[in-house]
Amino acid sequence: MASNLLQVWRNRTATDNPLQQAANSVALLVGSSQPFYPLGIVWIIGEPGWASSVAWATTPVFLAVPFVGHVSAVLGRLLLAFAGTLVTLLVVLRLGPGCWVEAYYVPVLLVAALLFRSGEGAPRALAFALPLGAFVIGRLGAGPDVADAGRLWLLHMGGALGLSVYVLFVYRQARRAAATLQASSDSAKQMDRNSSEPSRGDHG
């Protein structure tokens, strides 16, 4: 049943834009893993970790990325950057910067750097500005750290593992999209060259 629902979701959100397709894959990965994220924090630091359950509120935002991207690819990728920024900021405000949650702004910066074309200067700048601005807000508005210092190392280790997965996944999806765009560009150039060549008939 889960595979059928996933197939329906993919059919409804299919796109010919490789960059948006990469954003869709990232959004699905994050959105599907979010229900487990606060539970892991609770297991590590105990009762105070339930403050991270605020992350659940952003799950629909991640899952909306493909649907928005189906209407506008630029807005879909911007929504992904916004969702990644929002969930990180909310958790920082609840748990404090000592949990190193701010490191999750890195995948958002990768989205800004890799999933926007060179001609999409304004959207790319906004995607960069979101995590940078949120970092400042988080530092100014975060409460005291709630993590137990005795197990903080375990929280950092788990966070580093999760961060590595997200960074690698964003990078691989971006590389795949770039390869697809390059292949399309090469094919278009070849077609232009073929169409511009004069036809050669037999002049006997």
Image (tube, grey):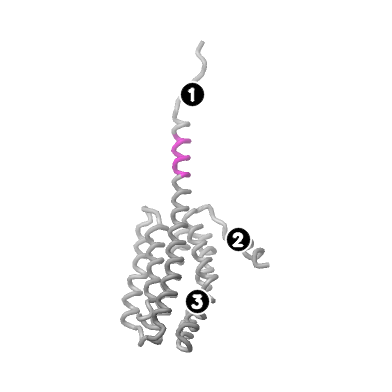
Residue that numbered label 1 is attached to: 199
Where is residue 190? Give x, y as percent: 46, 36
Magenta span includes 16: no
Name the outermost residue toward the top: 204
- What's the distance in space between the residues labelled 3 and 1, CA to CA? 63 Å
Q: Amino acid at mark 1?
A: Ser
Q: Of all residues shown, which one is farthest toward the bottom?
A: 47
Secondary structure of the magenta portion, mostly?
A: helix
Residue at image point 50% right, 76% down: 37
What is the number of the mark on residue 37? 3
Q: Amino acid at mark 3?
A: Tyr
For the N terminus, give its image quadrant: bottom right
What residue do we see at 45% from left, 49% from top? Answer: 179
Residue 16 visible in rendering: yes
Q: Is residue 134 left or right of residue 47?
A: left
Depicted 84 relative to depicted 145: above or below = above
Residue 201 vertical position relative to residue 170 in the rendered view, above or below: above
How far apart, in angstroms, are the residues tagged by discs 2 and 1?
44 Å
Q: What amino acid does circle 2 point to?
A: Arg
| Measured Cα–Cα span from mark 3 to mark 2 | 27 Å
Counting from the top left corner in percent of width and height, residue 12 is at: 60, 61
Image position of 35 (left or right of 129): right
Q: Label 1: few (<14), some or many (≥20) within 10 Å?
A: few
Q: Which residue is mark 2?
A: 12
| Magenta extent | 183-192
Mark 3 vs mark 1: in front: 3
Q: Classify mark 2: helix, strand or loop.
A: helix
